[in-house]
Amino acid sequence: MDRVGHHSVKKMFHALSTVDLKLNLIQELGQAEMNRLSGNAMGRAVIEECSLHDFMRGGEYTWKDVVSKKMRQKEWLSELCEDGNAVEKPTKKRRKRRKGANSGADLEDGKKDNNISKTSVVNTIMDTLTMNSSLKEKTSVGDSKSVDDKSRRSRKRKRKKASGRE
């Protein structure tokens, strides 16, 4: 039993409307296929889904009881689900809004124009970079004087220490 084949067999089993039609399928599977089906996980899934063990051990009547009980449970659940859907209205999914989503210009159809939002982001980045570079130029001139003064002072201290040692 391959990966696609076991799905096909399970779907076919559920698609068959009467127990007699399902019985024909189970008889075909049960004749010589039981050992082959139990050889891998997909085959064992078919055995469990179609109640092949019940057919092989208990016979046709036991299998019919088990399958008819499963069919009644399935019908009951489907009725229950249909009643529940009539009471509750399906809710519309809400989309999460991203922070800062207001930056793009809205078009008539409600979609954002990505080109405008991208250019505004690029402009903001470029403005920030130019501000940082102009600030560095202003501070670097003042900083160089203070660095020069510090280095002069440290050189004087070293000379005094060196002259005191001699």
Image: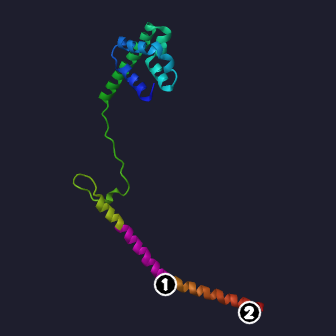
Q: Which residues are magenta?
A: 123-141
Q: Main secondary structure of the magenta part?
A: helix
Where does label 2 land, which residue? Answer: 163
Q: Helix, strand, or loop for circle 1?
A: helix
Residue drawn 45% across and 27% down?
2
Verify whether residue 122 appears in magenta: no
Which residue appears at 44% of the width and 13% of the height? 66
Q: Residue at x 29, y 61 (%)?
A: 115
Q: Position of residue 64 (x, y in %)?
A: 41, 10
Q: Nearer the viewer, residue 31 or 57?
A: 31
Instruction: Please give the name of the residue rendered at 41% of the width and 17% of the height, measured from the top-left corner.
Output: 70
Which residue is identified by label 1?
A: 141
Check disc 2: other Cα within 10 Å, few if <14, some if 14-19, many if 20+.
few
Seen in the image, is 64 located left or right of residue 92? right
Q: Is residue 133 magenta?
A: yes
Between 161 and 29, the one nearer to me in the picture: 29
Q: Amino acid at mark 1?
A: Val
